[in-house]
Each structure stands twice: as structure tokens, then as C-alpha cells.
Amino acid sequence: MPLLRSRRARLVVTTLLKMLVCGVAQGATALDCLPPVPPAPVTDAATRAEYRTEIGQEFTAYFDEAQAYLRCLDAARAEVSEEINRAIHDYQALGQDPDG
């Protein structure tokens, strides 16, 4: 039972952190994206049978968080791509090197 409490606590903390990170819509970097913590495997058949619903909910939450993490990484990639394009435009605006 203490293991389930710690998993739930971990899930709550991870969810709250995700909500804070996803609240930052622009300027996301890969450092803003927190990967989800995968559920710990439950190898005991009796525990799996008794807590099947809770364990299933934990895996479902993990898969949802994994999708949010991947969306965050995609947003960070898009932001960096825009910055690169702006830098290329600024560099091209410099024109020919007068000494070259």
C-alpha cells in the first residue's frame, strides 16, 4: 500500500508540474519539457489483481503525460526553427562582405 501512495504522490506532482510547464505557451525550450515518470512495474499477481483499476489508471495517465511531453518537445523544436530562420534572414540582410 505505501508503494501506491508514493506512486499517486508522484503522479500528482508530475501532473501539477506539467500544468505549470504547459502554461508557458511561447518561448518553450526542450528544458521546459519534463518527461513523465513511467509507472513502476507491479510483478505480484495478487497486487495486480487487487489494484487492477488503479494500476490501469496510472498507465493511462502516463500515456497522456507522454503525449503532452512529446507536444512540448514539438513546440520547442518549432520555436528553435523559427529562431534559426530569423537568424538566417538577419545574416542574409548583412549582404556581401565589403572585403570579399
Image (cartoon, rainbow, N blue to C red):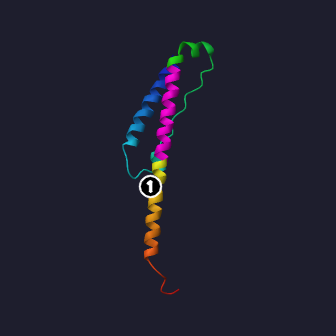
Name the residue: 55% across, 28% down.
Answer: 39
Helix, strand or loop under label 1: helix
Q: Is residue 64 magenta?
A: yes
Decide which of 34, 67 is in the foreground and name it. 67
Position above or below: 89 against 37? below
Q: Which residue is mark 1?
A: 79
Residue 47 occupies which quadrant of the picture? Answer: top right
- Where is residue 8 shown, x and y percent of the image? 46, 24
| Label 1 crowd (10 A; few <14 / some 14-19 / many >=20) | some
Name the residue: 46% across, 39% down.
Answer: 68
Decide which of 10, 89 is in the foreground and name it. 89
Whether residue 50 sits left or right of residue 32 in the image: it is: right
Whether residue 42 sits left or right of residue 24 in the image: it is: right
Number of dots carrying numbers: 1
Position above or below: 17 against 51? below
The amino acid on which the numbered mark 1 sits, given as a three-letter code, is Glu
Name the residue: 54% across, 12% down.
Answer: 50
> Farthest residue in the bottom direction?
99
- Where is residue 5 shown, x and y percent of the image? 47, 21
* Prevailing SS of the magenta stretch: helix
Q: Which residues are magenta?
A: 54-73
Residue 18 occupies which quadrant of the picture? Answer: top left
Position above or below: 46 against 97? above
Name the residue: 55% across, 32% down.
Answer: 38
- Where is residue 29 shown, x and y percent of the image? 45, 51
Position above or below: 76 against 40? below
Q: Is residue 66 magenta?
A: yes
